[in-house]
Image (cartoon, rainbow, N blue to C red):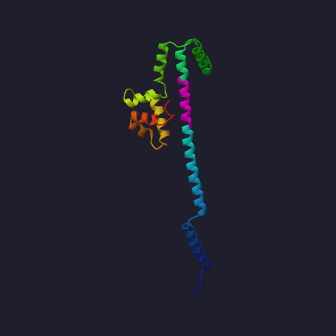
């Protein structure tokens, strides 16, 4: 007895061949979704870097404001602290304008305190470069963060620390507007 060819086997073979062909062929929709995902990941990373840079700039401004307020408080101890540091600072400036020069010892103390502020000023950076001093722990942390932003996050904190404090200070000092 002759056996008739089985139709389901042929359709199964054809379906398997079509499935293999579709898996082997690039899927333009999958490629488009993959490209969108990659772009979204890049956009997220860019946004995180921008956020970190903005946070660092905010911290820097806050540090500068606090250093100025502390310097005024040291130079003009006649104006007592209140709950509003901005009002205190304006009263101290007014006191200086009406009473003349502050106490020289107080001014020297203010300059000395400024050297220990968490955000290193130009004097601190220049002294670190010259090898006359090292950063405080807080100054080193801030300077590493600043260098990370300036380098576009191309280096890790460890890689930056390996460059040395003088190198870090030079990086911050050579970018206008970055030295406190």
Q: Name the quadrant containing residue 129.
A: top left
Residue 81 shows in the view: no
Q: Position of residue 30 (x, y in %)?
A: 59, 60
Q: Is residue 173 above or below residue 32?
A: above
Residue stretch rendered in magenta on the structure: 54-67
Please identify the quarter of the rendering in which residue 55 is found.
top right
- Picture residue at 57% right of the left edge, 71% below the top: 16
Up-down relation of residue 107 to residue 158 (above or below): above
Whether residue 72 can be seen here: yes
Check the image and name the residue furthest to the left. 131
Query: Compared with residue 155, is residue 89 higher up or lower down, i.e. above or below?
Result: above
The verdict on residue 63 being magenta is yes
Q: Main secondary structure of the magenta part?
A: helix
Q: Quadrant of residue 18?
A: bottom right
Which quadrant holds the N terminus?
Answer: bottom right
Report the residue at 42% width, 38% height from top: 160
Q: Position of residue 104 (x, y in %)?
A: 48, 13
Q: Position of residue 168 (x, y in %)?
A: 42, 35
**Lateral position of residue 20 relative to residue 154, left or right:** right
Q: Please state the total of marks drawn on the protein image.
A: 0
Residue nearest the viewer, comparing 82 with 65 = 65
Taking depth in this image into account, of 101 and 45 the one nearest to the observer is 101
Is 110 covered by the magenta stretch? no
């Amino acid at each position: 007895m002759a056996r008739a060819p089985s139709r389901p086997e042929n359709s199964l073979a054809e379906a398997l061949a079509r499935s293999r062909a579709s898996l082997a062929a690039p899927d333009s929709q999958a490629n488009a979704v993959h490209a969108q995902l990659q772009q979204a990941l890049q956009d997220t990373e860019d946004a995180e870097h921008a956020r970190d840079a903005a946070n660092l700039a905010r911290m820097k401004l806050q540090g500068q404001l606090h250093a100025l307020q502390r310097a005024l408080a040291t130079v003009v101890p006649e104006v007592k602290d209140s709950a509003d540091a901005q009002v205190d600072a304006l009263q101290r400036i007014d006191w200086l304008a009406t009473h003349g020069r502050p106490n020289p010892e107080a001014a020297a103390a203010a300059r000395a305190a400024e050297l220990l502020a968490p955000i290193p000023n130009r004097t601190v950076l220049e002294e670190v470069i010259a090898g006359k001093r090292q950063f405080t722990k807080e100054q080193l942390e801030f300077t590493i963060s600043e260098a990370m932003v300036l380098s576009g996050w191309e280096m890790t904190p460890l890689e930056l620390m390996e460059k040395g404090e003088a190198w870090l200070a030079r990086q911050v000092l050579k970018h206008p507007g970055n030295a406190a």
